[in-house]
Image (spheres, rainbow, N blue to C red):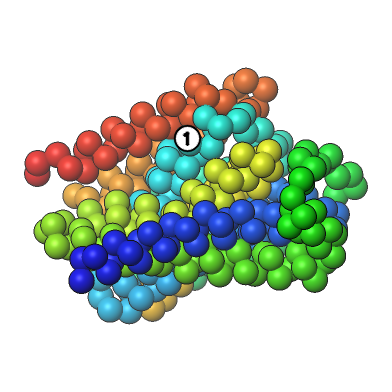
Amino acid sequence: MLYLWIFLIAVGLVLLVKGADFFVDGAAGIAAKCRISPLVIGLTVVAFGTSMPELAVSVTSAATGSADLSIGNVVGSNIANILLILGFSALICKLPVRRVSLVLDIPVLLLASLLLVVLGVWGGALEWWDGLIFLAVFAVYMVFLLRGARKGEQQPSEEKTPRSRLGIWYAQCKQRTWFLVLVTVLGLGMVVGGGQLLVEGAKYVARAAGMSERVIGLTVVAVGTSLPELVTSVVAAAKKQTDIAVGNIIGSNIFNILFIAGISSLVAPLEFRLTDNLIDALVALASALLLYLLAMFDGHRLGRAAGIVFLLGYAAYYVYLFLPA
């Protein structure tokens, strides 16, 4: 059985890497065709698509009474998205943070993170009315975001000229809208499916090792369900599609709290313990605040220094998680 899970983990990794490649190509192409900013594509289509594993895990966990796994998945994914994924992406190339993200997107993320802390502490659990508050804020944010979706100019493409016949055929097909949509959907399916295989395999190994449900949610499941964001953002950064890389993370984190936690709390109350969940939620809030502060330097770009700070912060959080109680 163990060898089967190892094989499935390997298959999931292949699906993730290649699926992210297709997904980024398709999303960037659609953005250019529709004259929509790649940042908005990253904040919506890419962010929602790569957050599907978190949605599936959190809602299923809430329905089966595993509140620790549900909250841990959301909070842990947000921490991993900023500290781990943006950290790695910033090491690959400098990530510009657009003015609209500093004015709208990151403040909304900070508000969502603060709401999670306040509402969780207030009632000792996230109830259905808390879920309605999350969803209402999410709806207002989407209205503001989509109102500014269209833009007047396109960024120049930096794609390399393909040399192989297959590469030339692929480049020609990417000029057709139907092909871009097909590639985006196919890539999304591969990313989500690959992520699920990796998560299930990791959960099997972690439970065999005797890890608690909270730690599994904050580490194995959170990182596992964040693998689509990780691979998509790293591939986007490598392809110089930096708006998609940054927008994917910010959008996914907003989606995780306002939509996924909102829907999950409608399914069943999510207990919020002051001893554990509050600290984790505060770390997620601090991560969003750190992102906002670091984006103010170096011409509103996240460079290698910021990436190192993020990764060191993530390492410190992991040390805290596995300290003896």
**Residue 161 placement: quadrant:** top right
Q: Where in the figure is residue 98, as x and y percent of width and height?
A: 70, 37
User: As rendered, which of 289 and 224 lies closer to the eye?
Assistant: 224
Q: Tell whether 102 sits left or right of 160.
A: left
Q: Looking at the image, which residue is at 33% across and 64% down?
A: 7
The quarter of the rendered structure image containing the C terminus is top left
User: As rendered, which of 234 and 245 lies closer to the eye?
Assistant: 234
Q: Tell whether 77 sits left or right of 303.
A: left
Query: Pointer 1: residues within 10 angstroms few (<14), some, or many (20+)?
Result: many
What residue is pinned by disc 1?
87
Q: Where in the figure is residue 185, as x and y percent of width and height?
A: 65, 69
Q: Where in the figure is residue 64, as x and y percent of width and height?
A: 28, 78
Q: Where in the figure is residue 66, as x and y percent of width and height?
A: 25, 70
Q: Looking at the image, which residue is at 76% across and 40% down?
A: 160
Residue most extreme to the front = 165
Q: Looking at the image, which residue is at 79% across and 59% down?
A: 169
> Looking at the image, how many numbered discs can be counted on the residues?
1
* Helix, strand or loop for disc 1: helix
| Residue 48 in view | no
